[in-house]
Amino acid sequence: MYQVIFNTHDVVLLMTAYQCILFAILLLTIKREKPLSNFFLAFFLLQQAAIPLDILISFGAEFRNVALSWSPNLFYVFGFGYWLEAPFLLWYTRSLIYKDYRLTKKDLVYLIPFFSYLIYQVLFYYQLELQDKQHLQEDYNLFSAPHYMNYVTLFREVFRAALGVMCILEIKRYSQHIKTNFSDIERLGNL
């Protein structure tokens, strides 16, 4: 008897993750003028691959059970993608705009939510015994999850959106800088 592991939605999630990983590898292996930009874009794509994998493991109808039979430690591993996606996009945007862009200590403040997520998962999930994690995942119900998780999810989405807006503002600021400092923008674009 055959068992269905993937539905159409699951296949789309896997294809998305696969393509992001493939493009990230390509970016990390080719030599370009701006290797830092390639690095940031590659790691942004890896975060983009982690998100559908997290969705697949956490909510995939049949795949959740398969992942649980492999190891309950697979749960929440790819959740880091939500917290790292926006900082890598912001840093990628800045690396394209500013010549000789480098990360500063001030830029690392964007990693605080990621480290908070990591510490939370280590303390409250990965410290549990394997059997406890197994039972927790078997009994998991999205509607019975702790209410504070709704606030964490809301903060995560606001964080992601805020950094997206910061990217747009950086691009607008750069565009305005070009308009005020260069007299012939059309000619500049042809160089």
Image (tube, rainbow, N blue to C red):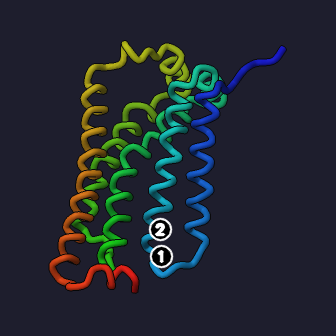
Q: How many marks?
A: 2
Q: Nearer the viewer, residue 66 or 13?
A: 13
Mark 1 surroundings: few (<14), some (14-19) or many (≥20) residues within 10 A: some
Q: What type is the residue that disc 1 sits on?
A: Pro
Residue 56's place in the image compared with 90, above or below, is: above
What is the quadrant of the N terminus in the image? top right
Residue lying at the far right of the rendered structure: 1
Q: Which residue is mark 2?
A: 39
Q: Secondary structure at mark 2?
A: helix
Q: Residue 190, labelled with which disc?
A: none
What residue sits 46% from the left and 17% below the top?
140
What residue sits 45% from the left and 78% below the top?
34
Residue 156's place in the image compared with 178, above or below, is: above
x, y percent for residue 3: 76, 18
State which quadrant residue 62 falls in.
top right
What residue sits 61% from the left and 30% below the top?
10
What residue sits 51% from the left and 44% below the top?
50
x, y percent for residue 123: 37, 36
Mark 2 surroundings: few (<14), some (14-19) or many (≥20) residues within 10 A: many
Q: Secondary structure at mark 1?
A: helix
- Distance of mark 1 from mark 2, alpha carbons? 6 Å
Q: Is residue 56 left or right of residue 148?
A: right
x, y percent for residue 112: 27, 51
Q: Is residue 5 left or right of residue 170?
A: right
Q: What type is the residue that disc 2 sits on?
A: Phe
Check if mark 1's residue and mark 2's residue have beta carbons within 8 Å. yes
Residue 43's place in the image compared with 13, above or below, is: below
Q: Nearer the viewer, residue 170 or 83?
A: 170
What is the quadrant of the C terminus in the image? bottom left
Q: Is residue 125 left or right of residue 120?
A: right
Q: Nearer the viewer, residue 129 or 25?
A: 25
Q: Residue 35, labelled with which disc?
A: 1
